Image (cartoon, rainbow, N blue to C red):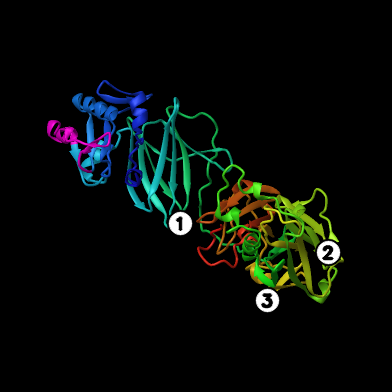
């Protein structure tokens, strides 16, 4: 299948059951539903056929159909050994084509269509998907390589070609050469780039957007200095706690290990939400714990002197499962307020903290099978400084260029705005925004108050032409982080980014 994709051979995968119910031989072709086929490919690993498939192939070969076999004829029928199909290659030598690989050049004419040809491929592999409509064809092309450009030449039937812009919703004229019965065009895709084209059966009269060409000498304008502003409050992930249970002395544990210990102490072999699949209600039916069961989890955090009593919020996942305390003071969540997910309750702890070590305490009594202990989170206007163990919550500092982690935002997962202005004497000139090295997931660009588009894949650039104004232009680049920043996993060994 991978080879067929790389060679731009269009195919369908055959299901023997569907062939049995809907297959027939009509005018020398295998017809299944509304599709018809003049070629059948047998993979090298195919060793067994069902009887209805075998009978269809008998008739298909008798009326002139072509079979391309990448291995020996199947030697089993309905799971029983047979030599019935071994004679196919001898009976139909002109129609039974044996080959070791689908990329054999001698197969090219048998597998490709005169109506759609791809040639001159260089660089990375381009894959395609084509849909034939009543008024033309849709052609989607993809380069999945993360580093290498890719080029191909396409020839197909049609009268006109437009690019469908999937980000702006408009049509853009696409260059092509018209031939007598077909048209041809070249495609170049950047790493992880894609292109959607509509190849029309007639000239397209609707107005399309024309790209401005680059003319004259290119000028580079560095967007510097910039104002840098986070769009949300900073976050601190607290994922180590002191765990206390009946017959279990107080000890400091990573939250994941603490959760495991909690379930083991309450009769489970492992954390059931990680290690098991619930049959019917087997797990939740064990939620029959009595008073006096449960645990106490204390999450420590340290504040610098100037942050004592500062405006801070606390986030606890599924807070209704616990009694929640800040420095031994019982607190309730803010009604109707949540963070990231509606099950993440928010508490106001402003004025309830002091310099040095503070404790957030979760008490579960009785135990619940739903008490899968998770980290807790601090939200507020602060920066985090690395300490011998964990972090110190310090007074906020102005952000600048560079790593968020190194500027006190190691767990921040929302967006940061980078804003500046530049001047143009001629608003009709083409202008492109191009990124250097950066580490966001996606960047949203606004120019003069309008959404100009997104940057998220190589070559990390965006044309700004239609949003330009003469004189001063205001640009804001909003770079989004990732929930990996806040949720991790941060301390577990194993595959980076893998979450159980």
Quadrant where the C terminus sits is bottom right
Outermost right residue: 351
Secondary element under disc 1, as helix, strand or loop, is loop
Q: How many numbered circles does the render carry?
A: 3
Residue 346 within the segment the image draws in magenta: no
Viewer-proximal residue, 322 or 1? 322
Q: Which residue ends up furthest to the top in the rendered image?
A: 27
Secondary structure state at the residue bearing disc 3: loop
Location of residue 457 with respect to 246 vertically, above or below: above
The span from disc 1 to disc 3 (Cα, nearest Å) is 38 Å
369 vs 143, nearest the viewer: 369
Residue drawn at x 83%, y 64% as measured from the top left: 311
Q: CA distance from mark 3 to mark 2?
A: 24 Å
Sooner in the amino-acid sequence: mark 1 or mark 3: 1
On screen, residue 264 versus residue 47, left or right, reads right
Labels 1, 2: front one: 2
* Mark 2 nearby-residue class (10 Å; few <14, some 14–19, many ≥20): some
**Camera-nearest residue between 116 and 295:** 295
Residue at mark 3: 389
Left or right: residue 267 compared with residue 494: right
Q: Please state, as top left, top right, bottom left or bottom right, where the N terminus lies in the image.
A: top left
Residue matched to label 1 = 146
The circle drawn on residue 311 is 2
Tell me: 257 left or right of 135: right
Q: Is residue 301 shown above or below 484?
A: below
Q: Disc 1 or 2, which lies upstream in sequence?
A: 1
| Image quarter of residue 222 | bottom right
Query: Can you tell which of label 3 and label 2 is closer to the viewer?
Result: 3
The part of the chain drawn in magenta is 71-96
Horizontal and vertical percent position of residue 430: 56, 51
């Amino acid at each position: 299948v991978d080879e067929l994709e790389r060679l731009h051979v269009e195919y369908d995968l055959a299901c023997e059951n569907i062939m049995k119910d809907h297959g027939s031989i009509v005018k020398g072709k295998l017809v299944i539903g509304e599709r018809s086929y003049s070629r059948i490919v047998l993979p090298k690993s195919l060793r067994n056929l069902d009887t209805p498939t075998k009978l269809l192939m008998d008739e298909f070969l008798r009326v002139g159909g072509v079979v391309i076999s990448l291995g020996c004829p199947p030697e089993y029928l309905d799971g029983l050994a047979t030599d019935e199909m071994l004679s196919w290659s001898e009976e139909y030598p002109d129609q039974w084509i044996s080959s070791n690989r689908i990329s054999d050049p001698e197969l090219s004419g048998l597998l490709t269509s005169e109506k759609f040809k791809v040639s001159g491929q260089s660089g990375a592999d381009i894959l395609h998907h084509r849909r034939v409509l009543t008024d033309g064809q849709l052609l989607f092309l993809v380069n999945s390589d993360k580093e290498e450009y890719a080029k191909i030449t396409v020839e197909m039937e049609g009268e006109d070609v437009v690019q469908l812009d999937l980000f702006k919703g408009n049509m853009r004229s696409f260059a092509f050469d018209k031939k007598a019965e077909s048209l041809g065009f070249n495609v170049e895709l950047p790493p992880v780039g894609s292109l959607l084209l509509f190849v029309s059966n007639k000239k397209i009269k609707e107005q399309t957007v024309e790209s401005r060409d680059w003319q004259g000498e290119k000028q580079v304008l560095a967007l510097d200095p910039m104002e840098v502003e986070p769009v949300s409050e900073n976050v601190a992930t607290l994922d180590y706690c002191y765990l206390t249970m009946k017959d279990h002395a107080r000890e400091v544990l990573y939250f994941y290990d603490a959760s495991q210990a909690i379930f083991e102490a309450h009769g489970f072999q492992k954390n059931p939400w990680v290690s098991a699949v619930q049959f019917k209600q087997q797990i939740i039916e064990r939620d029959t714990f009595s008073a006096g069961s449960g645990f106490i989890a204390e999450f420590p955090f340290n504040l610098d002197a100037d942050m004592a009593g500062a405006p801070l919020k606390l986030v606890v996942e599924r807070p209704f499962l616990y009694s929640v305390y800040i420095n031994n003071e019982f607190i309730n969540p803010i009604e109707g307020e949540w963070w990231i997910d509606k099950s993440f309750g928010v508490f106001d702890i402003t004025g309830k903290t002091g310099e040095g070590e503070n404790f957030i305490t979760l008490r579960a009594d009785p135990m619940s099978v739903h008490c899968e202990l998770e980290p807790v989170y601090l939200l507020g206007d602060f920066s985090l400084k690395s300490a011998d163990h964990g972090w110190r919550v310090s007074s906020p500092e102005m952000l600048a260029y560079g790593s968020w982690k190194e500027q006190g935002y190691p767990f921040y997962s929302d967006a940061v705005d980078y804003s500046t202005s530049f001047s143009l004497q001629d608003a009709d000139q083409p202008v492109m925004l191009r990124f250097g090295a950066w580490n966001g997931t996606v960047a949203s660009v606004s120019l003069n108050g309008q959404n100009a588009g997104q940057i998220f894949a190589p070559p990390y650039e965006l044309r700004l032409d239609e949003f330009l104004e003469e004189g001063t232009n205001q640009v804001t680049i909003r770079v989004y982080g990732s929930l990996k920043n806040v949720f991790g996993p941060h301390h577990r060994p194993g595959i980076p980014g893998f979450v159980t």
